[in-house]
Each structure stands twice: as C-alpha cells, then as structure tokens.
Amino acid sequence: MLATAVGGMSAACASADVIELKDGHQVTGEVLAEKANALFVDLGFDILRIPRDQIVRRGKAGELSPTTLAAARPAEDEDRHHFFDSSLLRTRPVKELVEGFGEAVVSIETPSGLGSGFLINEEGYAVTNNHVIEGETRIAAVLYQNTPSGLARRRIENVEIVALNPFVDLALLKLPPQKDLKLGHVVLGSLDDLKVGDGAFAIGNPRGLERSVTQGIISSLNRNFEGLIYLQTDAPINPGNSGGALFNLKGEVIGVTNMVVRGGDNLGFAIPINYVKDFLRNRDAFAFNKDNPNTGYRYLDPPRRLRSGAPPKRSQADKETSGTAKSPSTSQ
C-alpha cells in the first residue's frame, strides 16, 4: 500500500525513477545509492530500502507508465503470479546464487536409482527428468537446508507423480506438505538473451555426490538430437545430475540437465527452458493417473519406410507400452 501511495504522490517529478516491484506495486523517487543487494530511494519524506530481488523493472518517470510496463514485460512473466516464477533477476557471483537458490535443488530417490530435481513453487511442485522416475511407484525427495553448521538433510517420502512427458524427458512431481518448513523455489529464465559463451552452472547429485556445483559456459544453443533441440554446456554433467537445474549467471534456470556424450569430455546437454515452460503450462495434457501408467502418453511411433525385401519391424510402442526409452549411450 505504501508503494502505491508514494508512486502517486511523486509522479510529478520527471527526473524521478520509477521502480516496479514483483507484487505489482510501483515506487517513485530519487535513487540515492545502489548497493549489491538493494537500492535506497528518497521518497521526499523518508528513505526506502528496496531489495534488488524484489525489483522487476526500473525507468524514469514518464518513460514507464503502467501501460508501457505491462506491454514491455514478456507475457510469460505473468506466470510468476500463478504456477511458477519467471521474474527478472540481475547478475551476481555464482557463490551468492548457489546460496540463494541451492536449497530449491533436491535429490530424487527411487528403489532403482538416484537423480536430481528442483522446486518451482512454494507448494512443493518439482521438475525432474521422466527417465529418473520412469516405471517407479515409490519416490522420495531429499531437501538440503542451509544451517550454521552446514547443510541439513531432510528426506521426504510419498512424492506424487503429477505429469509425465517422455518425449521431452520431463516429469512434474509434488512433495507432500511440510508444515514446519517453508520451501524455496527457483526462477525460470528465458533463452531470449542467452548467447554461446555465456556462463552457466549446474547443481545436482552426480554419482550420488549430493549438492555438487559445476560451472562452465553455453557451448551451443541448438544441438539437435532425434528432432529435439538441446542446450550444450561444458559444465561437467554426470549420472545423477539428471533432472537438475542448469542456471545462467543471474540464477535463472535455463535448462534441465539430462544427457552427456559418453567417452567425451564435458559434453553435457540440457532440455531448454522453453520446453519446460510449455510442459508446465500444459501439464493437464500430460496428467499422470496412478491407476493407468499409460495415461497421457500412449502413442504409436510413425511407420518407417521398409527396405525392399526386408521383414516388417515391430514399433517401439509394440515392444514397450511405457513410452519411448532414452538411448542408453546418452541418458543420465
């Protein structure tokens, strides 16, 4: 309420800064100081400290009206008011980003293996790879909380499968409510400003080494495998990283790590964030029904052209009703 009132009283000052906040309010005043974590704004009768992680956009009075702000903001940013957060962040050192968002990265444990995942909202919804939980009926998640004595490990049983899309290797899970714990979450980024050579880092559980951080660059924005586009990175990716987050240097998730080229050095791949957002927005189309393991993805492979005289081959759907499997040479 204070921000709205101040914005109205100070709008006449053409030289003032207009700062839009995550909650939709605006603050208008003169920026006196810009610190690493906050702006200090002169309101005319008081000084207001505004945390940088609450700022969506900044401009001069008259340049950014509520109408132009709404028009300038990507439509996908509206998702931060709904199922996932896609607000704008600023570049910070990796150690600060790991401290800020690392708690949102979790281990995904099943009777047959270990993978990674990340929380996308405070309700406990988490993204991972489909191949991490494919065919499983018992799934647990491990949270890592920062404490003065180090990371505190909490294992959560009875994780629910919400949606599956094996064709882009994505799964949506739901952790049961934790009444004594407020869950952190990541921010989903965009590929619009991403360039080859930009820095990136991954957080996951390679080879069971929990909460490992690896850093590198974006090696390619459009590597094609079986008709799908992947981000390529030289940040080390290993088995156990699957389903974990690939971050840019603003701390925004830009991909979901899921493959490497075995026998190569630092040839890792991630599902681009635009695929992830489309999956989350259309999650009802891929809803999982525990009473019908084929719910949402019982499709047939397209017919293939046969060589002359060659016997017909059975399709993948005839051999496996659980969906198309990832190549064993690349899956993590």
Image (cartoon, rainbow, N blue to C red):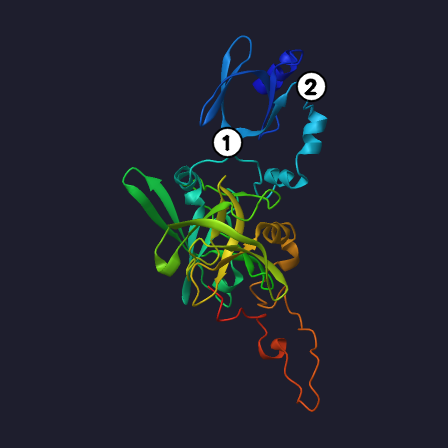
Q: Which mark is residue 62?
A: 2
- Examine the rendered structure and indicate whether residue 201 appears above or below residue 53: below
**CA distance for labels 1 and 2:** 24 Å
Residue 92 relative to residue 302: left or right: left
In the rendered image, which residue does mark 1 sit on? 53
Residue neighbourhood size for the residue with mark 1, other residues' Cα within 10 Å, grouped as few (<14), some (14–19), many (≥20):
some
Q: Position of residue 123 (x, y in %)?
A: 52, 44
Which of these two is toward me, 184 or 263?
Answer: 263
Picture residue at 51% right of the left edge, 10% below the top: 46
- Label 1 sits on what residue type? Asp
The kind of secondary structure element at disc 2 is loop
Q: Residue furthest left?
A: 149
Q: Nearer the viewer, mark 1 or mark 2?
A: 2
Residue 235 relative to residue 322: left or right: left
Q: Which mark is residue 143?
A: none
Which of these two is toward me, 277 or 306?
Answer: 306
Q: Is residue 98 visible?
A: yes
Q: Position of residue 303 (x, y in %)?
A: 70, 77
Give the number of callouts: 2
Picture residue at 46% right of the left edge, 59% below the top: 242
